[in-house]
């Protein structure tokens, strides 16, 4: 039997292309309109993963010529104190984008904070006004991860129109906005979740299968139809060597075992890569796939927010 030919949809060239476009737009806004878009990132507490994410966001903003501000508040910050910071940023005319890094400490209700952000500056696209605008097909700020998935599909010239897209996961951050974006691009969309019965029977019908579940290697060969395009949004750490043998074929196993040995774990998506490679026509790797697009799309959202608010 001949081996399945699978195309790897690497996120790196797409993220680089988007960042280049953003840098060019920032330059043009500065030369032709006399301002530079400004992103304000707010972090509360000492969550180490959040510190890395925020650091990367600030660093990328600076590389692309955007102005960026990092507001770091103590873990004891009250909800009212955080609301005041958000309100001050809402009122400042020079701030175009506001991002409050999640998770927040337990004394603060995420929903209250996200709803306090001016929807015009809501570069994460989580405010109910932006969610509603997206659902009703109006111009809006769109959550970065699903927006990045669409960029990958389009820039690799994968046809969306008329295709059956199946999404596993219905979170507000990934699954639901993903469904809206695929619908806007004329796919026929099915959304699955933990209560879906006979998941493989549904997912194996997909031309485009998007996995956003949060469980390492959950999507197996039985979930994937022959020739499907598989998009893996998941980011999980795997430290179990036996599990690594189930996930990786000979092409990757040695490298991954070395990573586990050196760092204690390796990054794995929600799709079993060995089994996806045997059935899919194309798939996004983890790491190096969708994850690389998220920050690039945040930068793009900041420029889009600046242009929309300033009516450019
Ligand atoms: P959530 O935990 O919010 O949502 C997970 C979804 O998966 C839920 O809708 C849940 O269903 C569904 N699910 C869980 N178990 C099953 C199952 N056994 N069968 C079918 N569906 C199931 O996760 P997120 O959407 O926030 O994130 C999903 C993944 O994407 C994670 O791995 C996360 O790390 C990653 N991620 C990556 C980003 C990136 O930049 N690349 C950004 C954001 C997330 P139900 O609703 O019924 O509980």
Image: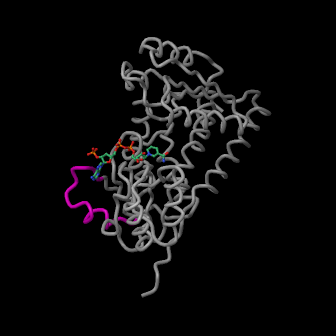
Give the quadrant of the N terminus: bottom left
Residue at 61% in and 41% down: 300
Q: In this rendering, is residue 61 above or below 117?
A: below
**In this orientation, does residue 188 appear?**
no
Tell me if residue 49 is in the magenta stretch. no
Please give the name of the residue rendered at 48% of the width and 72% of the height, measured from the top-left corner.
Answer: 250
In the rendered image, residue 201 lying in the magenta stretch gets the answer yes
Quadrant location of residue 270? Answer: bottom left
Q: Position of residue 290 (x, y in %)?
A: 51, 52
Quadrant occupied by the C terminus: top right
What span is colored magenta in the figure?
A: 192-207
Residue 28 vs residue 276: left or right? right
Image quadrant in which you'd find residue 204: bottom left
Measuring from the top left, give residue 17's x and y in whole percent. Answer: 67, 52
Q: Is residue 206 visible?
A: yes
Q: Quick check: 4 left or right of 11?
A: left
- State the residue lying farthest toward the right: 31
Q: In front: 43, or 11?
A: 43
């Amino acid at each position: 039997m001949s081996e399945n030919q699978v195309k790897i949809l690497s996120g790196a060239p797409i993220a680089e292309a988007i960042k280049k476009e953003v840098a060019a737009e920032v330059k043009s806004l500065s030369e032709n309109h006399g301002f530079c878009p400004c992103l304000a990132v707010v972090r509360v507490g000492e969550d180490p993963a959040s510190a890395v994410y925020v650091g990367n966001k600030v660093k990328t903003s600076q590389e692309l010529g955007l102005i960026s501000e990092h507001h770091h508040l103590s873990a004891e910050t009250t909800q009212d104190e955080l609301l005041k910071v958000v309100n001050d940023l809402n009122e400042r005319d020079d701030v175009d984008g506001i991002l409050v890094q999640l998770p927040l400490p337990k004394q603060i209700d995420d929903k209250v904070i996200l709803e306090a952000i001016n929807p015009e500056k809501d570069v994460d696209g989580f405010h109910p006004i932006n969610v509603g605008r997206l659902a009703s097909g109006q111009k809006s700020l769109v959550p970065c991860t699903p927006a990045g998935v669409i960029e990958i599909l389009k820039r690799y010239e994968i046809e969306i129109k008329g295709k059956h897209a199946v999404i596993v996961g219905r979170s507000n951050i990934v699954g639901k906005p993903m469904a809206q974006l695929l619908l806007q691009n004329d796919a026929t969309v099915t959304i699955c979740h933990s209560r879906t019965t006979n998941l493989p029977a549904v997912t194996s019908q997909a031309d485009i299968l998007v996995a956003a579940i949060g469980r390492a290697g959950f999507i197996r060969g039985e979930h994937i139809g022959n020739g499907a395009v598989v998009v893996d949004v998941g980011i999980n750490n795997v430290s179990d060597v036996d599990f690594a043998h189930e996930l990786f074929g000979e092409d990757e196993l040695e490298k991954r075992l070395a990573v586990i040995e050196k760092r204690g774990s390796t990054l794995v998506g929600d799709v079993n890569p060995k089994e996806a490679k045997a059935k899919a026509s194309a798939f996004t790797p983890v790491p190096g796939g969708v994850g690389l697009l998220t920050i690039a799309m945040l930068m793009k959202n900041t420029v889009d927010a600046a242009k929309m608010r300033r009516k450019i």
